[in-house]
Amino acid sequence: MRLENKVIIITGAGSGIGKETALLFAREGAKVVVADMNERAGEETVVEIKKNGEGIFIKLDVSNREQAKEMVKITLEKYGKIDVLINNAGIVQDAFLSKMTEDQWDKVININLKGVFNCTQAVVEVMMNQGKGVIINTSSIVGLNGNVGQVNYAATKAGLIGMTKTLAKELGKKGIRVNAVAPGFITTPMTSNVPDKILEMMKEKTPLRRLGEVKDVAYAYMYLASDESNFVNGAVLCVDGGLVI
Ligand code: NAP
């Protein structure tokens, strides 16, 4: 029970990494708020959580500031506190720069970057009043290394590293730790359209010679969410099998 009685909001917990994390955290004793735009997927995650844990679903589009505030209000009404926020929701809209539309650029910025601003600002006042809290942002190795065809996505994931380090400095004295996880290539619905040839190439480039699984990232989130990482602040934890070293 590494997360016993902690109230943990996970955005984008209806699918992929977020869903795996929600289920793992519930098994470890957390009360999990599954916050996702996809109502059907989010509700399904909660049904699974409730088999041996506690959680609720809140419909949330992270790019909507009012919905982020409402999420905090509902969470406090239900559980009375917020220990951890995981800003996990994210999307891709890939294209080479020459072909990228303004809409593709704006969508990715609004969800991946502004969405983190919205949710973090909404929870931070609660955490400051509590005198403690943990925020985990989901970056990517693409934010560290760049990636062809992902200029919008890379800009957001690099931006999250700047936000993480800045907020670690701003909020540390209030007892709030802010860290980031930078996953490598993880098998999820987000990466399901990647051609086999590219997948094989990624495996070969990775020192551990495999792709990541959702549980690899979920366990990294768990370390950062738990009291085991009490002196870790402003860190970017790569979960990539050694791809970027
Ligand atoms: P995923 O399987 O696509 O799950 C993302 C979830 O977020 C989905 O349920 C999605 O709903 C939801 N979502 C999308 N837009 C949202 C919004 N505006 N507000 C709230 N929820 C929203 O993705 P994943 O692969 O698990 O990725 C999770 C995080 O890890 C993302 O931030 C991603 O950038 C990052 N990451 C992933 C990888 C990888 O290889 N998979 C690598 C590095 C970083 P819909 O299903 O309706 O879209």
Image (cartoon, rainbow, N blue to C red):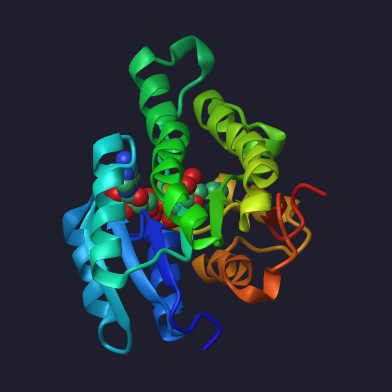
Closer-to-camera residue (204/6): 6
Question: What's the residue at 59%, 62% (across, down)?
Answer: 212
Please state if 191 lies on the left or on the right of 49 as rendered.
Answer: right
Please state if 78 lies on the left or on the right of 169 as rendered.
Answer: left
Query: Residue farthest to the top?
Result: 98
Query: Residue farthest to the left?
Result: 40
Residue 48 percent coordinates (x, y): 27, 79
The answer to whether residue 73 is above or below residue 210 is above
Residue 8 percent coordinates (x, y): 42, 67
| Quarter of image, res 74 | bottom left
Question: What's the residue at 62%, 65% (across, down)?
Answer: 224
Closer-to-camera residue (168/108): 168
Q: Tell me how many marks there are.
A: 0
The answer to whether residue 199 is above or below residue 64 is below
Question: What's the residue at 36%, 71% (across, down)?
Answer: 32
Please state if 167 lies on the left or on the right of 127 as rendered.
Answer: right
Closer-to-camera residue (227/239): 227
Query: Residue farthest to the right?
Result: 245
Q: Is residue 183 visible?
A: no
Q: Is residue 5 visible?
A: yes
Residue 243 percent coordinates (x, y): 74, 51
The answer to whether residue 128 is above or below residue 209 is above
The answer to whether residue 159 is above or below residue 122 is above
Please state if 187 lies on the left or on the right of 41 as rendered.
Answer: right
| Quarter of image, res 9 | bottom left
Question: What's the residue at 45%, 29% (across, down)?
Answer: 94
Residue 88 percent coordinates (x, y): 45, 52
